[in-house]
């Protein structure tokens, strides 16, 4: 059965184009406004949202924020006619997983959706971070970060369950990989996101199943058994269904696992790491999380704050942001064959942002900007053109819009001047189509020299 895509678009022509491009591969549902969008999300089974920003009943990124509050792990891609870098930057800061210009949809839309779509079953991470498309693990040179990571290794070496309670984007998965690297166990690192697996499937995902255990069931090894002699990382443990929790607690206590449809006990031995961005103690009080399981993975509630690992946020320690900037710039310069050297102005600009999605958000913004701009050096000198390194007291979106608009105007102007007014050469150097560059010139009222034959 095809995955379901929700297209939120009020323009019938663009909605028709989206359906045409996607309906062969996906089940496409089209809605035209916010209320219908929210209602459809509440009905469930949506795996991806394609979101237009120009809806008549909602402003800017307001609906994006609402979608992410309802479904934090649901991928959302901004789909817009505005071919401007500010849209990409603001989209990522606001929580979007990707963006695409509508006019470029024919070649890229289905590909990006396949890349970002939330799977019914999360793929297993069986190795520490060896993916060449991912930056290496960075531990900032700061006492708080060093203390947290050092404590994690101490807990891991004594075989203690590790519980991480931190905000989204702070690097809970990175912490799990770091622990796995240091332990160097014989078995794999098995990564399970409890929020991304439907409740009806999570039990078979964890414990495995035998053929005939339920309709369409086949013999399959569960993630718990797969983690034998390795590390089992359960992200968003707070989303583990209440009816599954007693069975999982028994596995932790007895180190034995029974697949669905079987009476055979399988011995398992693994280091358990759990993580969440919610208040799990409050979930216990509300009857949404089993007290005995809480005590087992966290510790007695009178002492649980002593045993929790809390990853710092960029809001709390903005002084580490320059280290992350350098780390990500070095990586993505190599990935995209760029030579961006961030100036003090751009470092200060990014350091003073309110990174709600923390390190993950910072990484996405740097990756998107480096990938989008052919010549990144211009951005450093333009992000704070007046010498100011702080964002003004006006709302953040307007400040960001103005600065990035100025970046575009200056980059286009310099390129046109350097090519003596030749639009074809300028468009090629900017990585734009000639028609797109003409549109930008008209939009920003940029003067074009007649020294060369402009197309």
Image (cartoon, rainbow, N blue to C red):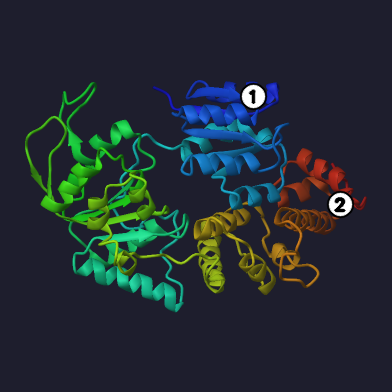
Q: Position of residue 241 (x, y in %)?
A: 31, 39
Which residue is the site of mark 2? 421
Q: Position of residue 130 (x, y in %)?
A: 36, 57
| Quadrant assignment, res 409 | bottom right
| Label 1 Cα crowd, 10 Å radius (few <14 / some 14-19 / many 20+) | some
| Quadrant assignment, res 11 | top right
Q: Which mark is residue 15?
A: 1
**Secondary structure of the residue carrying numbered label 1:** helix
User: What is the C-alpha distance between the residues marked 1 and 2?
Assistant: 38 Å
Q: Is residue 220 above or below residue 15?
A: below
Q: Can the viewer see residue 218? A: yes
Q: Is residue 390 above or below residue 122?
A: below
107 vs 394, nearest the viewer: 394
Q: Is residue 330 above or below residue 447?
A: below
| Quadrant assignment, res 337 | bottom right
Q: Report how many numbered discs are placed on residues in the image.
A: 2
Label 1 or label 2, whichever comes before in sequence order: 1
């Amino acid at each position: 059965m095809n995955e379901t895509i929700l297209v939120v678009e009020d323009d019938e022509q663009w909605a028709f184009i989206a359906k045409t491009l996607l309906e062969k591969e996906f089940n496409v549902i089209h809605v035209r406004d916010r209320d219908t969008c929210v209602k459809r999300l509440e009905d469930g089974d949506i795996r991806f949202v394609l979101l237009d920003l120009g809806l008549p009943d909602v402003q800017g990124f307001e609906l994006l924020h609402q979608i992410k509050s309802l479904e934090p792990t649901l991928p959302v891609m901004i789909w817009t006619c505005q071919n401007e870098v500010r849209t990409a930057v603001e989209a990522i800061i606001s929580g979007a997983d990707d963006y695409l210009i509508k006019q470029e949809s024919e070649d890229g839309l289905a590909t990006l959706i396949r890349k970002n779509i939330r799977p019914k079953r999360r793929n297993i991470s069986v190795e520490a971070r060896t993916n060449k498309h991912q930056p290496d693990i960075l531990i900032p040179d700061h006492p708080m970060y060093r203390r947290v990571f050092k404590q994690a290794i101490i807990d891991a070496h004594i075989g203690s369950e590790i519980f991480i309670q931190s905000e989204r984007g702070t690097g809970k998965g990175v912490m799990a990989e770091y622990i796995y690297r240091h332990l160097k166990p014989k078995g794999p690192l098995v990564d399970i996101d409890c929020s991304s697996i439907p409740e009806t499937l999570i039990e078979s995902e964890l414990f495995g199943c035998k053929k005939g255990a339920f309709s369409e069931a086949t013999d399959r090894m569960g993630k718990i058994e797969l983690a034998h002699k390795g590390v089992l990382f359960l992200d968003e443990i707070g989303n583990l269904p209440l009816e599954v929790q007693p069975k999982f607690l028994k596995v932790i206590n007895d180190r034995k696992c029974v697949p669905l449809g079987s009476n055979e006990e399988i011995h398992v031995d693994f280091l358990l790491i759990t993580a969440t961005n919610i208040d799990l103690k409050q979930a216990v009080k509300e009857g949404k999380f089993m007290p005995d399981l809480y005590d087992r993975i966290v510790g007695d509630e009178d002492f649980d704050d002593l045993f929790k690992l809390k990853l710092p946020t960029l809001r709390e320690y903005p002084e580490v942001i320059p280290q992350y900037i350098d780390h990500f710039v070095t990586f993505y310069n190599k990935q995209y064959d760029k030579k961006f050297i961030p100036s003090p102005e751009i470092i200060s600009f990014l350091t003073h942002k309110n990174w709600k999605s923390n390190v993950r958000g910072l990484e996405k913004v740097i990756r998107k900007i480096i990938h989008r701009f052919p010549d990144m050096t211009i951005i450093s000198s333009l992000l704070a053109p007046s010498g100011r390194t702080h964002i003004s007291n006006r709302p953040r979106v307007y400040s960001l819009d103005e600065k990035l608009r100025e970046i575009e105007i200056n980059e286009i102007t310099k390129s046109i001047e350097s090519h003596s007014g030749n639009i074809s050469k300028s468009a090629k150097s900017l990585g734009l189509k000639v028609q797109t560059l003409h549109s930008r010139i008209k939009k920003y009222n940029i003067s074009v020299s007649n020294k060369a034959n402009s197309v």
